[in-house]
Amino acid sequence: MPSDPRSRSRSVAMVIGLVVVIALISLVATRWKVLPWVPDASTVGAASPSEAAAAPPTVAGPVDLATGLQVPWGLTFLPDGRALVGERPSGDVSVITIEGDMEPVGTVPGVADDGEGGLLGIVASPTFRDDSFVYAYVTTNTDNRVVRMRLKDSRLAGAQAILTDIPKNSFHDGGRLLFGPDGMLYVTTGDAGDPEQAQNLASLSGKILRITPDGGIPDDNPFSGSPVWSYGHRNVQGLAFDDAGRLWATEFGSSAYDELNLIEAGANYGWPVVEGAGGQASDDQGFVDPQVTWPTSEASPSGLAWRDGVLYMGALRGERLWEVPVTGAVAHEPTAALDGELGRIRTVMVAPDGTLWLTTSNTDGRGSPRADDDRVVSVPVG
Ligand SMILES: [Ca+2]
């Protein structure tokens, strides 16, 4: 029986219409991450490519500033443009000039070389010209603590603990220090091998803490009488404030996903209940999901720096520098630089001349040290 041409064209139109509707639903669902999807370039939760910011400027050609160091960890710039760098196992601190001259200024007392612990973060006071204060995050025989010293006549002296009893362990000691635009000192801690404590607001483990420059508790902290700023962290070693004063933090995952988080006061970042992006499970439990995640083999992120709309994240196991463009409060798809060139990258700081200064961690027992490791390098951007 010959078919009616009008009914046949109606059928064709219906099929085409159905295909278009399915395509539109898939597009919308993918855009809003309704359907499960495999992240491209390891991003989860980043904005769709159409919203991505411009590609970051080129980062290449590291130049040695200092070599032969033992696990240089913390790095901080002084108002005169020189930097202080600390060596983790010994607690030794040196000053480095932009020309690459290095001179020791002393040793932080009480440092215990214990697994991932030792002399970790180091930061100069934002009012250094007036007070000469330098702060360090130190693993001792009994705890992790924040100590304050003075740097006078190129010598460190007068170490005084301003925050003590942060739980320590061979692993997951946190350790980054950074002053915020609010003049407060932000301190990252690890779960110290006891993951449940990350959810315990009475413990200093697995937290980002916020204290005054004297070690006091600011009146406007989210939990009254507590230094806790955010919680549910596994091991945070990277902090950076963007131009709008938002706080970003890197976090080591356990076996699946490393994280880049936008930190909000009082928020819970999920560890150990959720690692990486939990989606609905996070929503149901009030956890904040990361904005970007990586397989731990590609990142294991430590230091973080903000420069001109881009977050630069040093990867230890991933042995590269991740560049994450940011617009507003949204982090976009990352790209990798310096892949394998330096080995394990611990710390990233922006120097006064706009270059990035990086420290390597190839002598920490987990890397393959090359001649003259470890080092502090300067990397031009753009
Ligand atoms: Ca998390």
Image (cartoon, rainbow, N blue to C red):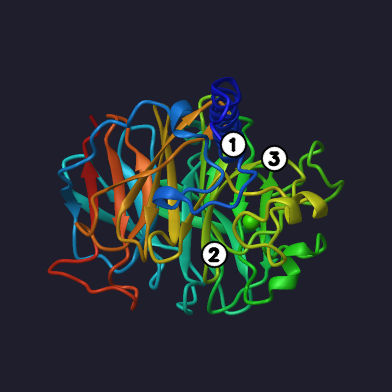
Tag shown at residue 134? none
Q: Using the numbered discs, state the Cα–Cα distance from disc 2 to disc 1 in whole angstroms.
A: 36 Å
Q: Is residue 357 left or right of residue 181?
A: left
Tag shown at residue 22? 1
Mark 3 or mark 1: whose residue is earlier in sequence? 1
Residue 202, image x and y in percent?
82, 63
Q: Using the numbered discs, state the Cα–Cα distance from disc 3 to disc 1 in whole angstroms.
A: 38 Å
Q: Give the amino acid type for the residue marked by disc 3 in the picture.
A: Glu
Q: Is residue 242 left or right of residue 218?
A: left
> Regarding mark 1 in the picture, which secondary structure is present there?
helix
Say if residue 154 shows up in the picture. Answer: no
Quadrant of the image occupied by residue 199 = bottom right
Q: In front of the other: label 2 or label 1?
A: 1
Q: Is residue 2 left or right of residue 298?
A: right
Q: Give the amino acid type for the residue marked by disc 1 in the picture.
A: Ile
Q: Nearer the viewer, residue 2 or 91?
A: 2
Residue at horizontal 61 percent and vertical 74 percent from the top: 168
Residue at horizontal 65 percent and vertical 59 percent from the top: 233
Q: In front of the other: label 2 or label 3?
A: 2
> Regarding mark 2 in the picture, which secondary structure is present there?
loop
- Residue identifier under label 3: 264
- Residue identifier under label 2: 253
Q: Residue furthest left?
A: 371
Residue at horizontal 23 percent and vertical 74 percent from the top: 368
